[in-house]
Image (cartoon, helix red, strand yellow):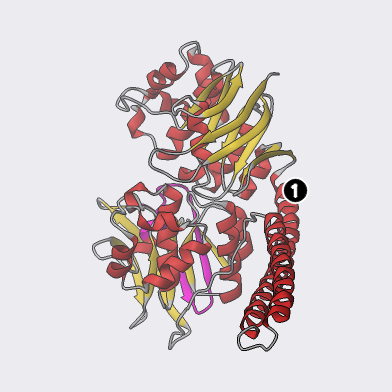
Amino acid sequence: MSLIKIENLSFAYPGSFDNVFDHASVLLDTDWKLGFVGRNGRGKTTLFRLLMGEYEYSGSIASSVAFEYFPYPVPDPSLLTLDVLSAVCPAAEEWELLRETSLLAVPAESLYRPFDTLSNGERAKALLAALFLNENQFLLIDEPTNHLDLAARETVARYLNRKKGFILVSHDRAFLDACVDHILSINKADIEVKQCDFTTWLADFERQQALEQEQNERLQKDIRRLRQAARRTADWSDKVERSKIGAGDKGHVGHMAAKMMQRSKNLQHRQQRAVEEKSRLLKNVEYDETLKIWPLPYHSEKLAEYRQVSVVYDGRAVNAPVSFSIRAGDRIFLNGSNGSGKSSLMKLLYEEGIDYHGTLYKGSGLIISVVPQDTSALSGGLDGFAAERGIDGVLFKAILQKLGFSRTQYEKDLREYSAGQKKKVCIAASLCEKAHLYLWDEPLNYIDIYSRRQLERLIAAWQPTMLLVEHDKAFQDALATQVITL
């Protein structure tokens, strides 16, 4: 056991006026299994980069262990997987790599295939296994679940639960609960660590958030009252000053006015100090603001229907024939392993040129809103994106602000956004669109826990008709009216 000491850490990106960290301090034990949570853009990946020594900073970071970052870059993915993993952990014997990857349900034959022929999920699990074989290293694991289906997430969670000595960035609530014993959190104000599982941390956080929000509302009411009183005092002073004009005994009136003016000034100073003291008490709280959506009613109860449908690529069906109907108010989740055709089944409703067997019925005049799985190609400004999508730019930015965007983000090119911020752009656009049916393909990839809760509450409240692919079990359990397993 050893300690990682972060003291008075301050950091800002070049050209930025805002610090990502401002005199942050925290003490971590290298035996802990830490879940790392916070809104997108708060600095989770930045902290990992700082621990890796990639940026200059003020303050100090002291540790007796080396840090390793996941996902690990593979210089030549055409090599055999065994050779790739041996480069990650040169001290590991072949039998050790076979044993470790088997714990993550990676087939033994996968080690003797070129790395680039493995699925994204198999690559992630193989690299994770190799990194854990390195001794005296503390792993910085950055969102490992984004390429994993539900079964693979459960496998990785069981694996991590057997390990120790890592910080894990994940926004999957069930995944975090299954494999961490401490929560490291970043909010607007600071960074802190608590010894508990994620569910306990979230319950404590929500209680504290509610108390601080209630306190803030009382303080803001007091501040408004004090400011109104200060304005009344200033108005009274002006009236006193005007009363000297035209008075008979100007000496007496001037003397009395001066005394009243001084009393007014003293009162104004006291009121201003009271406002400042109250303002200092305001908490910098992470609010979960309420979102809205505007689903359109459809003229028929049935919007679409799949009858024994299989998606076909290169003449081969990628999924067994599936049948289901999408009716008003349904929230249907498609489950299945990676590559089982979930996204393709969804695309049949809005994209041309996909081959399939079976019968697909799509209601006439059906208006569809889409959140795509891949957002990597987004570029340009928010205004241009809104215009291209045909949505209200003011409403669009208001929704983004509720999802945790600061105004400084509005001026950036979308290419500069994090993966989570890009996903929020697509979600916000979909929320602006009035549609009969919402098709969301892995909408929670890279999305922080705070925003996940906002979206969960939104869907539960407004009950739009939806077809979704999403591997977050807590989200699915809370919202699904039907689950189709491929």
> In the rendered structure, which segment of residues is drawn in magenta?
317-344
Residue hosting label 1: 200
* Residue closer to the observer: 29 or 413: 413
Residue drawn 40% across and 61% down?
Answer: 426
Instruction: Please give left or right for residue 333 compared with residue 75 in the image.
Output: right
* Residue closer to the observer: 226 or 44: 226
Asked whether residue 239 is in view, the answer is: yes
Residue type pointed to by label 1? Thr
* Residue 182 quadrant: top right
Residue 193 magenta-highlighted = no
Please tell me whether mark 1 sits on a helix, a strand or a loop: helix
Asked whether residue 106 is in view, the answer is: no
Residue 314 location (% of width, % of height): 25, 50
Compared with residue 318, is residue 15 higher up or lower down, i.e. above or below?
A: above
Compared with residue 391, is residue 174 higher up or lower down, i.e. above or below?
A: above
Residue 91 location (% of width, % of height): 49, 10
User: Label 1: few (<14), some or many (≥20) within 10 Å?
Assistant: few
